[in-house]
Image: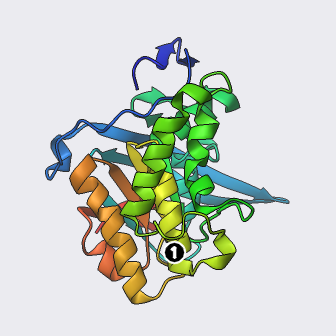
Amino acid sequence: MNDQFKIQNSKLKIDGDVTCAAADSVPVRNPSSATVVLRAERLQRFFIDGDRRLDVLKGVDIALHAGEVVALVGRSGTGKSTLLHLLGLLDQPNEGLILVDGTPAGDLSEFDRAYLRNAHIGFVFQHYFLLPEFTVFENVLLPAQVACSPFNWPARKQSYCDRATELIKLVGLENHVHQRPATLSGGERQRVAVARALLLEPKILLCDEPTGNLDPETARHIMELIFGLSQKRGTGILVVTHDRSVSERADRVLRLESGMLNNE
């Protein structure tokens, strides 16, 4: 990411706008030897309900490498989504360390955390989270508008628009560019969400039950898109899933149980 992000005294310094850098890594099929793009150590997350403390995560350690797909499985209610939200900097742990592409996130301001998240992490959720008043094209373009300042947006707008157009075509929605989410099927909405997640070419893609609302055939197509990222662009992908056909294709499978992660 050029030199936008610099570590000084464990703080994130932002020298300008987030820019899209094309992934320059060769497709990785031996993840253990690849760069670690996301690391968490000793993560704890608990909630207080009156006099009762509910421990959801009890010292979780995880490392995600460039070019690998890791499936996160476990019973409903075990904290898989909680872990994903922590790793994606959407929430903060009570204890523990998270490093995003080598940058420690714990001491960052909310502003800096948002910039780090937007630059390095893409999200695909079960429920899409598209803006209903925006068209397909506008939804896909949104991360770039968030990343750029109003001063730099005019100079960068065309390149981002070209990228959005390319991604919309990649997910097979080139005939739906000007439609709004309400006019799309569930599978089409999820394709929009995938395209949006890829706009800034993130090093990390976090997926929370991305096929949970889809029929089997549509789910298969969505996962083909997602798995293709690790092979073609070296993206590190962590996917929460109950779908065995998804976990069987992953490079590794981790099970979250009783607040701890174990290899399957």
Q: Which residue is at a point 34% across and 45% down the rendered structure image?
A: 63
Left or right, 149 with respect to 51, comes to left
Quadrant (top left/top right/bottom left/bottom right) for the C terminus: bottom left
Q: Is residue 186 above or below residue 204?
A: below
Across and down, in percent, residue 78 comes to: 55, 69
Residue at 39% across, 72% down: 222
Q: How many marks?
A: 1
Name the quadrant containing residue 157: top right
Judge whether 203 appears above or below 263 on screen: above
Q: Viewer-proximal residue, 40 or 11?
A: 11
State whether residue 174 appears in this view: yes
Q: Nearer the viewer, residue 6 or 43?
A: 6
Q: Residue at x 37, y 32 (%)?
A: 21
Name the one closer to the observer, 47 or 236: 236
Residue 86's place in the image compared with 97, above or below, is below
Q: Position of residue 89 (x, y in %)?
A: 58, 43
Q: Which residue is mark 1?
A: 188
Q: Secondary structure at mark 1?
A: helix
- Whether 3 is drawn above or below 213: the answer is above
Which residue: 32% across, 60% down? 70
Compare residues 223 and 173 and report the one nearer the observer: 173
Mark 1: give few (<14), some (14-19) or many (20+) Cα within 10 Å: many
| Residue 253, quarter of picture | bottom left
The location of residue 36, given as percent across then percent down, is: 30, 38
* Three-letter code, disc 1: Glu
Quadrant (top left, top right, bottom left, bottom right) of the N terminus: top left
Residue at far top of view: 8
